[in-house]
């Protein structure tokens, strides 16, 4: 694989994309937005982008707008050289690496995109303003790069829902491609945060996926059995602090009522030590 073009400015990435589009034929552009510290889950998104587009752009930008008051922006892992080398191995063509001052030259953007009621629940309730920051930076990236398709991972299910709705509501000319969650052999969803576990915590963390599997297996018996199965698995591990366990309708992301029958998405957020984990899966309430 050839080395990707590294574009540190908006002007540079626009020029690189324009030159890429000028190649032979109608070339499709895919964008994979990331905050760096790349792992196999991120690289799976790039590989999917490579399958469905002619030119793959990966953005690496630690977006300050999506960090809450109790979240340390300065401690977020940054490994640009390693990330660019990994992206070269999976065929990324352009890596957009803007600084905070490049993306927000006048300080934090006064114009923000909000996600309505669905952005204030679950992750939004735990991380106030998070999705406003996510939607704002995604909108900026789509405007800057102008891709035909943008690729996200299903692990961040609420983010995927909100981005899909934003694209639809604001008529962005882009398709949202969603890639299944990438997991370790024991089922734990890959995350940059997993590197912070000690061995005991890492062993306990897999219980989040165990609880999700239990909920999916029990879903045919109704929502009460579904929730109880997940809670039973989580209660067996005192090192796990449950943030939320929710069952929502996939098309609206609103909680389902007791009599609901049909497809649902089960979502879990929990802490093991100082590491926050999220996971989700589809199920069918019987």
Image (spheres, helix red, strand yellow):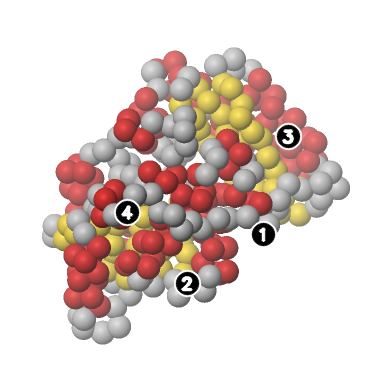
In percent of the image, x 29 and y 54: which residue is there?
105
**Quadrant placement of the N terminus:** bottom left
Quarter of the image for residue 49 reads bottom left
Coordinates of residue 270 in the picture (x, y in percent): 56, 29
Image: 174 above or below 38: below
Image: 91 above or below 246: below
Q: Is disc 2 in contact with disc 3, using a CB cutoff of under 8 Å?
A: no
Q: How far apart are marks 2 and 3 (CA)?
A: 37 Å
Which secondary structure, mark 4?
A: loop
Q: Is disc 3 in contact with disc 4, using a CB cutoff of under 8 Å?
A: no
Which secondary structure, mark 2?
A: loop
Whichever of callouts 4 and 2 sits on the residue coming sooner in the sequence is 4
Whichever of callouts 4 and 1 sits on the residue coming sooner in the sequence is 4
Q: Which of 19 and 181 is in front in this view?
A: 19
Disc number at residue 166?
Answer: none
Q: Which of 34 and 279 is in front in this view?
A: 34
Coordinates of residue 74 in the picture (x, y in percent): 31, 33
In percent of the image, x 44 and y 15: which residue is there?
200
Q: How far apart are marks 3 and 4 (CA)?
A: 46 Å
Residue 44, visible in the rendered structure: no
Q: Name the front one of labels 3 and 1.
A: 1
Which secondary structure, mark 3?
A: helix
Q: Distance between the residues labelled 4 and 2?
A: 25 Å
Disc number at residue 227?
Answer: 3
Q: Name the residue under label 1.
A: 251
Q: Mark 4 points at which residue?
A: 106
Q: How far apart are marks 1 and 2 (CA)?
A: 19 Å
Whichever of callouts 2 and 3 sits on the residue coming sooner in the sequence is 2
Q: Mark 2 points at which residue?
A: 172
Residue 171, visible in the rendered structure: yes
């Amino acid at each position: 694989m050839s080395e990707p073009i590294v574009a540190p400015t908006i002007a540079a990435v626009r020029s690189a994309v324009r030159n890429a589009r000028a190649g032979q034929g109608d070339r499709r552009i895919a964008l994979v937005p990331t905050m760096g510290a790349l792992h196999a889950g991120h690289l799976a998104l790039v590989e999917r982008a490579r399958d469905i587009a002619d030119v793959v752009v990966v953005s690496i930008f630690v977006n300050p707008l999506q960090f809450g008051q109790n979240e340390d922006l300065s401690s977020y892992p940054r490994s640009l050289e390693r990330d660019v080398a990994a992206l070269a191995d999976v065929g990324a063509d352009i890596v957009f690496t803007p600084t905070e001052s490049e993306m927000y030259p006048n300080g934090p953007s006064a114009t923000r995109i909000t996600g309505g009621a669905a952005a204030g629940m679950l992750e939004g309730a735990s991380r106030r303003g998070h999705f406003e920051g996510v939607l704002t930076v995604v909108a900026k990236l789509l405007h800057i790069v102008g891709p035909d398709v943008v690729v996200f991972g299903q692990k961040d299910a609420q983010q995927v829902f909100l981005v899909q709705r934003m694209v639809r509501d604001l008529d962005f000319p882009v398709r949202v491609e969603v890639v299944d969650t990438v997991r370790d052999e024991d089922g734990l969803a890959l995350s940059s945060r997993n590197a912070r576990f000690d061995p005991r915590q890492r062993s306990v963390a897999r219980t989040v996926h165990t609880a999700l599997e239990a909920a999916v297996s029990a879903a045919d018996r109704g929502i009460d059995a579904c929730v109880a199965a997940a809670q039973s698995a989580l209660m067996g591990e005192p090192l796990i602090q449950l943030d939320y366990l929710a069952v929502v309708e996939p098309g609206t992301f609103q909680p389902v009522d007791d009599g609901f029958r049909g497809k649902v998405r089960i979502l879990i957020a929990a802490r093991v030590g100082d590491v926050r984990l999220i996971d989700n899966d589809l199920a069918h309430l019987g």
